[in-house]
Amino acid sequence: MMENENAPVRRPSATTRIGIAIAAALAFALGVYFLIEATRPSGGLISFSFLLVLPAAVSAFVCYVADPYAERSRGQYLAIPFWLLLVVIVASIFVLREGVICVLMLSPLWMISGMIGAAITYKMRRRLPDESGRTYCAALVLLPLLSMQVEPMIPLPLDTKMVARSIVIDASPKQIWPLLRGIPDVRPGEGAWNFSQDVIGIPRPVGARLIGNGVGADRYADWGQRIKFRERIVEWQPGRRIGWRFIFDDIAGWGYTDRHLMPDSPYFTVTTGGYTMQPLGPNRTRVTIDTRYRIQTPVNLYSALWGQLFLGDLEHNLLALIKQRAERGTVVGEGRR
């Protein structure tokens, strides 16, 4: 019995096409991820190829494969990066074990880059003849791989940034100075609510203790979850200024941090910090904390915005802790009474 040659050809559903396209794209993206990790373990993921080129290529590929008959609208194309990003977030946290901070910082870049790739494909999809589809998809797959070869030849910009926060405390510099030397007994609930520590989950300080006096002394900081580091005193003006240089010589034992955001890495290094006091009147003082760091990434301006958020929140919490202790008249060592 002969088949009816005029019978309509069954097309796979849009959901099926999108699912197949996303699965293929994610398999490719995972391959690139592991390739970068294997060839550039010290910082390959903080790269132009991974941050911007790969998401654009992946989104463009999914959009093209999911719409073989050029029937979908521009809005539907631009929605693809959003759904793709959700899948990437789940895979990153639960499969690749990436930290929440890394995923959070990655998401806006991937979204913007993905939408650019989707928009370009929307225009190209209606201009390319059907027989050019395989060539276009192959070019999308090759683009991140070619970018990975070229990128090491381009030097990354190196910038020095500073984050500073201030607070006015109803106490004299003499009362505040012992607290700037270190508070060894921070209690749960002290400090201030902030996005970085209360929503994202960055640890809060447990205590800090200064061993010795003057330039050359060491301030030992404990932030829980095995996060401990030293601050070598480099500025010492009692009642006025205390400054230090960060020393991360026990970083391998840290129990919490995103592995691509260690504070002593090739692309992000926290260098110095300190407190400054400015008398405003009897028993009234402005206290300022500053933190400086070096940054070397393909997107320094973007990364610096996150630096302002995260470091700013940590500084704000420390200042709130000092204000609470100073205005209560609690001396160092009495926090656990």
Image (spheres, rainbow, N blue to C red):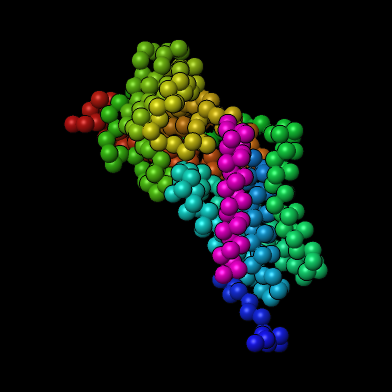
The residue lying at 63 percent from left, 77 percent from top is 11
Q: Is residue 310 left or right of residue 152?
A: left
Q: Which residues are magenta?
A: 16-45
| Residue 298 in picture, x, y percent from top left | 66, 39
Q: Is residue 204 visible?
A: yes
Q: Is residue 8 left or right of residue 256?
A: right
Between 275 and 5, the residue placed more toward the observer is 5
Q: Tell me: residue 164, above or below residue 9.
A: above
Magenta segment, principal secondary structure?
A: helix
Q: Residue furthest left?
A: 337
* Quarter of image, res 6: bottom right
| Residue 101 in picture, x, y percent from top left | 48, 44
| Residue 176 in picture, x, y percent from top left | 35, 27
* Quarter of image, res 122: bottom right
Between 294 and 110, the residue placed more toward the observer is 110
The residue lying at 66 percent from left, 85 percent from top is 3
Q: Is residue 316 visible?
A: no
Between 208 and 256, the residue placed more toward the observer is 256
Q: Is residue 82 magenta?
A: no
Q: Tell me: residue 229, above or below residue 310.
A: above
The residue lying at 51 percent from left, 44 percent from top is 102
What is the count of numbered marks? 0
Which part of the image, by quadrant, shows the N terminus? Answer: bottom right
The residue lying at 54 percent from left, 46 percent from top is 105
